[in-house]
Image: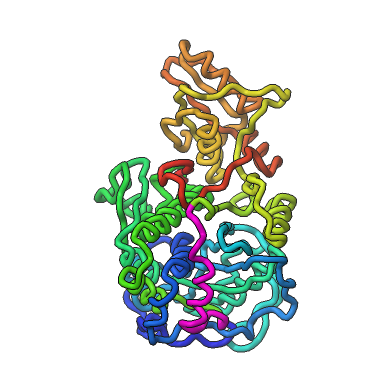
């Protein structure tokens, strides 16, 4: 990897690896951006009272062919690392010693220093990974159609390869990354504890087996349905959850993690900006993060953070890189992604349609406006092997005011044509729903209620369209229970 990491103040990089528990790899997108946003709040005198140095990675691994600087604003790459080293192994580590990045965000801070947009990059997105430097000093060959999270693992180093991920993001976006920040399990845990916990929303009861599908039994209750304040291990468990909530989509989980970050920022701002409140956060930040050399001192980090302190909650937006499924992976929708990157490069506000991969739209195929789903209760079942299809359909339907009572996997996952099954007295509701699924078969049943069973035709239509409803980006000021796919 580019340069060498300085020893962490918590000793994470230098300690012998502790015993690892067998768990599935974690995705801590919320952890990564929370570190940067905490820095933005914990600016000023609190930083200046700290004397410790900050872990950095060298710049010698950055590409020689970098994009030109943007017209305005700054771009900060935030990477969540699931390194299993040191303290991290006790916080849900998995197998292996290689640091990995499952999701990352590119935070664009507008030139007015009052607005910001965070773009989530799906871990399974198929991208070009350019030539990257390995720890032995050699450089890899460029790779096409590689999963995005593989960039961080180039060189197989425990601390990961931030420079390679930065090169990949610059190749993908055409934007110059001004700064890069990496935070790991232990850092995320400490940050959530330092702020006194973060309020989250859970749509249904969640058990140990949902977090660890390898368990033979359901296990203890982890989260009861409703709102909770979580920190430390509980916060990690919440942002990692995929099974037992929705249909197990990694893509859907991104939105829940974005809501977590918004709640975190809201909590920090509610506590006020004073040295007594900020010093613990600043201390954790300097001990928990690995950054580029441009942020490699307390004063540099403080100067950068001071530029962000005036960004309002409602002006901190979260979007996801435009995407569509390609088998088990995620393909970038180039036309929409290009518009997104162009807007950020020009420091322009987004148009509100930067996200894709959603199902449903405002009009029927014949151009007539569709009826609202207000007052109509339905259930959604995914009858395909396309992960996340049910969660995405649920989210789109809820935006059209349908009440979705459940999102599950159908008994058969080989459904060709989407079906809408309804009770005799719900025929009118079924017809309203059918307008959102062109070509769906309507079938009357005595089972009661109305449900849509998504078929392969719907999955192909979503993939071919590459985009769907216009969607206002989530902001840090939004309600934590609103507009979640629970995937």
Which quarter of the picture shows residue 432?
A: top right
Residue range in magenta is: 293-313
Residue at figure coordinates x 43%, y 51% from the top left = 242
Q: Is residue 34 magenta?
A: no
- Colour logic: rainbow
Residue at figure coordinates x 55%, y 30% from the top left = 400
Q: Is residue 321 above or below residue 436?
A: below
Query: Quadrant where the N terminus lies?
Result: bottom right
Q: Is residue 409 left or right of residue 204?
A: right
* Residue 326 visible in rendering: no
Q: Is residue 253 above or below residue 359?
A: below
Residue at figure coordinates x 65%, y 39% from the top left = 468
Image label count: 0
Q: Is residue 302 magenta?
A: yes
Q: Nearer the viewer, residue 359 or 350?
A: 350
> Quick one: which residue is furthest to the top in this view?
425
Q: Is residue 169 left or right of residue 445?
A: right
Residue 9 percent location from the top left of the image:
37, 84
* Residue 231 visible in rendering: yes
Q: Main secondary structure of the magenta part?
A: helix
Residue at figure coordinates x 57%, y 65% from the top left = 149
Which quarter of the picture shows residue 105?
A: bottom right
Q: Nearer the viewer, residue 304 or 18?
A: 304
Q: Nearer the viewer, residue 29 or 96?
A: 29
Residue 153 percent location from the top left of the image:
55, 73
Q: Nearer the viewer, residue 263 or 379?
A: 263
Residue 286 percent location from the top left of the image:
41, 78
Residue 428 percent location from the top left of the image:
53, 14
């Amino acid at each position: 990897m580019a340069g060498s990491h300085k020893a962490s103040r918590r000793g994470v990089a230098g300690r012998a690896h502790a015993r690892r528990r067998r768990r599935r790899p974690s995705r801590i997108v919320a952890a990564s951006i929370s570190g940067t946003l905490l820095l933005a709040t914990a600016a000023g005198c609190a930083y200046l009272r700290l004397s410790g140095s900050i872990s950095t990675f060298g710049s010698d691994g950055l590409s020689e062919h970098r994009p030109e600087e943007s017209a305005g604003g700054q771009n900060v790459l935030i990477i969540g690392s699931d390194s299993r080293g040191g303290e991290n192994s006790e916080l849900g580590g998995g197998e292996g010693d290689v640091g990995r990045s499952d999701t990352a965000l590119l935070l664009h801070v507008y030139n007015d220093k009052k607005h910001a947009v965070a773009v989530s990059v799906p871990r399974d997105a198929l991208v070009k990974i350019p030539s990257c430097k390995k720890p032995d000093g050699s450089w890899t060959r460029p790779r096409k159609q590689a999963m995005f999270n593989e960039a961080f693992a180039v060189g197989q180093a425990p601390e990961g390869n931030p420079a390679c991920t930065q090169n990949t993001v610059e190749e993908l976006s055409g934007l110059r990354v001004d700064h890069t920040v990496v935070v790991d399990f232990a850092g995320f845990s400490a940050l959530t504890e330092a702020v006194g916990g973060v309020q989250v929303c859970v749509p249904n009861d969640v058990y140990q087996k949902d977090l660890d599908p390898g368990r033979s039994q359901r296990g203890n209750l982890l989260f009861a349905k409703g709102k909770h304040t979580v920190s430390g291990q509980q916060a990690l468990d919440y942002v990692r959850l995929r099974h037992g909530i929705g249909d197990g989509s990694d893509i859907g989980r991104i939105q829940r993690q974005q809501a977590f970050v918004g709640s975190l920022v809201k909590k920090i701002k509610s506590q006020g900006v004073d040295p007594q409140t900020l010093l613990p956060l600043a201390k954790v930040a300097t001990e928990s993060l690995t950054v580029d050399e441009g942020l490699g001192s307390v004063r540099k980090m403080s100067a950068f953070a001071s530029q962000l302190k005036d960004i309002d909650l409602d002006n901190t937006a979260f979007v996801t890189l435009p995407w569509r499924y390609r088998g088990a992976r995620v393909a970038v929708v180039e036309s929409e992604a290009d518009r997104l990157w162009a807007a950020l490069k020009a420091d322009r506000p987004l148009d509100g349609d930067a996200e894709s991969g959603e199902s449903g739209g405002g009009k029927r195929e014949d151009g007539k406006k569709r009826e609202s789903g207000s007052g109509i209760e339905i259930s959604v079942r995914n009858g395909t092997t396309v992960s996340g299809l049910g969660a995405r359909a649920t989210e789109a339907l809820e935006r059209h005011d349908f009440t979705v009572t459940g999102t599950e996997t159908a008994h058969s996952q080989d459904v060709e044509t989407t079906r809408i099954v309804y009770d005799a007295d719900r025929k009118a509701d079924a017809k309203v729903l059918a307008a959102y699924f062109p070509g769906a078969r309507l079938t009357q049943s005595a089972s009661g209620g109305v449900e849509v069973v998504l078929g392969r035709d719907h999955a192909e239509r979503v993939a071919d369209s590459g985009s769907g409803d216009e969607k206002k980006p989530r902001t840090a000021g939004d309600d934590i229970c609103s507009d979640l796919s629970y995937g």
